[in-house]
Amino acid sequence: MKQVIITLFCIALLSACRDEKKPPPPTENKSNDRTAAQADTSGSAAIDLTELILTIIKNQEFYQLAEYIHPTEGIRFSPYGYVDTARDVKLTKLEFVNQLNNPTSVTLWGSFDGSDQPIRLNLKDYVKRFVYDVDFLNAESRTFNHMVATGNTLQNLKSVYPESVFT
């Protein structure tokens, strides 16, 4: 299930260890990396980009991560494998950075599976709990455009993002 969550996170990027107070100066958009990953049918560019993004997330370099957020689509956060386009939190790059700049700001990200209790966390705590809670950089296996999921959660990734590549 956790592989699905990181897959969702990486797809959004493809289509509080550090006390960072201010974002770094703006840099060029990373759309060339994303475009190369989408055009590569073998998957090597997508896998390379995924490793880069996972390293950024693992190191909690969230301002650097913001540079990979899609300029018009933003980034979607789905706490579980099912992508709910009506309810999932979707942030623009600016909203993402604002969340980082306000670490006491709590967001309603959805509800916990099974209990239906609200998931209310700041961005960094949400990432720790729902995005990168295991070491995905050292996963047992890697796939390209193939879902690896367990449990009974519905998977609708391919129907929500039909033109996207994923790892």
Image (cartoon, rainbow, N blue to C red):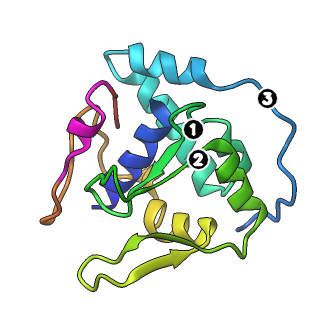
Q: Is residue 74 above or below residue 61?
A: above
Badge 3 density bin: few <14, some 14–19, many ≥20, Cα 10 Å: few
**Where residue 34 appears, x then y in whole percent?**
51, 24
Q: Nearer the viewer, mark 1 or mark 3?
A: 3
Magenta residues (range)? 155-163
Residue that badge 2 annotates: 55
Question: Is residue 32 part of the magenta span, yes or no?
Answer: no
Q: Secondary structure at mark 2?
A: helix
- State yes or no: residue 158 in magenta: yes
Q: Quadrant of the C terminus?
A: top left
| Residue underneath mark 1 | 52
Task: Tell which of 141 and 144 is nearer to you.
Answer: 144
Q: CA distance from mark 1 to mark 3?
A: 17 Å
Q: Is residue 21 left or right of residue 136?
A: right
**What is the number of the mark on residue 27?**
3
On the question of residue 37 being in view, the answer is yes
Amino acid under label 2? Thr
Kindly indicate the quadrant of the structure image that contains residue 150: bottom left
Q: Amino acid at mark 3?
A: Thr
Whether residue 21 sits left or right of residue 62 in the image: it is right
Task: Tell me what residue is drawn at x 37 percent, y 59 percent.
Answer: 87
Q: Residues within 10 Å of mark 2 (few under 14, many from 20)?
A: some
For label 3, the SS is loop
| Placement of 2 over or under 62, stated as above or below | below
Residue 32, position as x, y percentages in the image: 59, 17
Question: Of the residues under marks 2 and 3, which one precedes in the sequence?
Answer: 3
Q: CA distance from mark 2 to mark 3?
A: 19 Å
Could you say which is closer to the camera, residue 98 or residue 86? 86
Quadrant assignment, res 160: top left
